[in-house]
Image: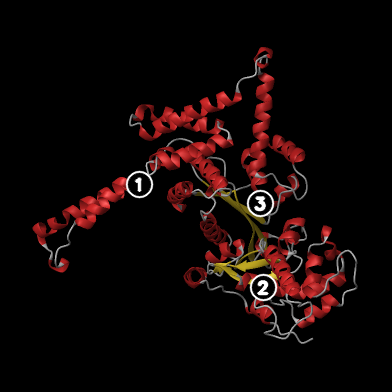
Amino acid sequence: MNKKALSILMRARMKPNLSLSPLSLTNATSQLQQQNSRQNESPGEGNSPPNDSANSEREFKRVRASMHSAISMNKTEVLDDVLNSFSEGYFSLSRVNRRNLLLVLAREYDLNRSQVRELINQYLGLELPADKAQVSGFEDEALFSPFHRIERNLRHALQPVYEILFERLNTHPGGLRILTIVRADILSILAEENIASLRALDSNLKEKLITWLSPAALELHQITWDDPASLLEKIVAYEAVHPISNLLDLKRRLGIGRRCFGYLHPAIPGEPLIFIEVALLKDVAQTIQEVLWDSPPISENEATCALFYSISSTQPGLAGINLGKFLIKRVVTQVKREMPHISTFATLSPIPGFMSWLLSKLASQTVLAEGDNLSQPQAEGSGSTFYENILKPGEEEALMSLPKRRDIATGKNGMDVMFNLLTSSSYKWIHSPELLSALKPPLMRLCARYLLQEKKRGKALDSVANFHLQNGAMVERINWMADRSEKGLSQSGGIMVNYVYRLDHIEEYAHSYFSNGEIHASSDLHRCIDVVDTA
């Protein structure tokens, strides 16, 4: 695909604030191929429609047989042909048949538990030497020979048979791409059904991919306007944070004062597994508008901040494999080497879970208030054990003092009013200075609380926060009305957050977060939570 074709693609498929998801892109391509195939058929081919069910069953059996051969065959001279047959056949299967095939793989090519149990019983039947500390010399060492033999056999028995397929595909041309697609299918099924054998299959494949996609196997590539249009199309299609709206937008993100880096793997040429977009600025940006739309950019020699404003994965099958951690560190190293005057490495990040958490909190508290007749604030300790008025008295008063508007600013208490405002159609509240003034204090305070205090299994509840914190960042600042797009408003009420990577503390912060969930944050952000209402 040349640049002209890319331009046509973008004009035809893209609108502002809309991006092509990998699934929609795949579906569109599949539909186009099916249309072309039908157009190329001779007139006689359509006279007698095939038995789709019979063909589907026949294709499933053929792919199942090729999968069995790929696992069991030892003739290396024909193995490539068998793997090719399996790969091509897998692509041709329907979603239902892919599910059925993966269940066959997970259940019929699992480990032999009878053998594992027998080996464990043999191992438990061995007697340890009376005093291991006194064992020395060749003859005494022979006492452990049965242990070593059974341990070796046990390690082998604990390897599922389907590992053979994974390992053979990994060394086969195009096999790594197949494996990522297989895992994407597994994750899609598990999102709907909790199947233990399939979850074990996913866990095994994930561990393999983590090993095969180590940083040493990945190439850091700076993506520029001079790259092939086929690669640039991937950037357009997979940008997940701030959709690329048109050709000019793409060119800006790859031009002066901007950088885009991706991780490439030789087994998946021409397609970054993950990519990150960087803006070179004088100061840490507070709104996404100034990153995406302000022009012209400053001279790169004047920049002191490298701001990471978007990171996107192109492979759904690599979910849960933290390539972003290594990518950020590699990019920091490269930018610092090329531009020593850059002293600050920060992000301008979305807070995708904030509004969902807040609305759930407001709704549940409203239900509790109605159940316990708590329509008015109660004395501390009274009412339901689970009831919590999450508003400060001054915040409550400001919300209740708003002119009652039949469409949005109504409610029995401040939390009720806040819920109605935030769920109003078309986000009417962002167009009213009065409403913005009443909402800003509680939203900013509660957002700081959400980022620093709300946790799941000891780690930050917000997925983006967890990602940056486990990579060694600290939470520096939250920014009001930083993203006014529909996505930004629906996810976080327009609030965005700056995470900062302090180079001297990255490992320390990452370790303390991993060990005990400690979240490092600026004093300003802590004060935002601890603010005492004086109204």
Whether residue 98 sits left or right of residue 167 in the image: it is right
Mark closer to the chain start, 3 or 2 = 3
Residue 466 drawn at (x, y percent): 57, 64
Q: Secondary structure at mark 1?
A: loop
Q: Which residue is mark 1?
A: 159
| Kind of residue sitting beneath label 2 | Ala
Q: Which mark is residue 228?
A: none
Instruction: Give the quadrant of the N terminus.
Output: top right
Image position of 535 with respect to 358: above or below? below
- Residues at circles 3 and 2 in contact by the CB criterion of under 8 Å: no
**Kind of residue sitting beneath label 1:** Gln
Neighbourhood count class around disc 1 (C-alpha, 10 Å): few under 14, some 14–19, many 20 upward: some
Count of labels in the image:
3
Amino acid at pointer 3: Ala
- Residue 236 vertical position relative to residue 424 in the rendered view, above or below: above
> What secondary structure is marked by label 3?
loop
Whole-number angstrom distance, CA of label 1 to CA of label 2: 46 Å
Residue 504 as seen in the image, left or right of residue 429 = left
Disc ID at residue 448: 2
Location of mark 3 (residue)? 240
User: Is residue 285 among the parts visible in the rendering?
Assistant: no
Mark 3 or mark 2, whichever is nearer to me: 2
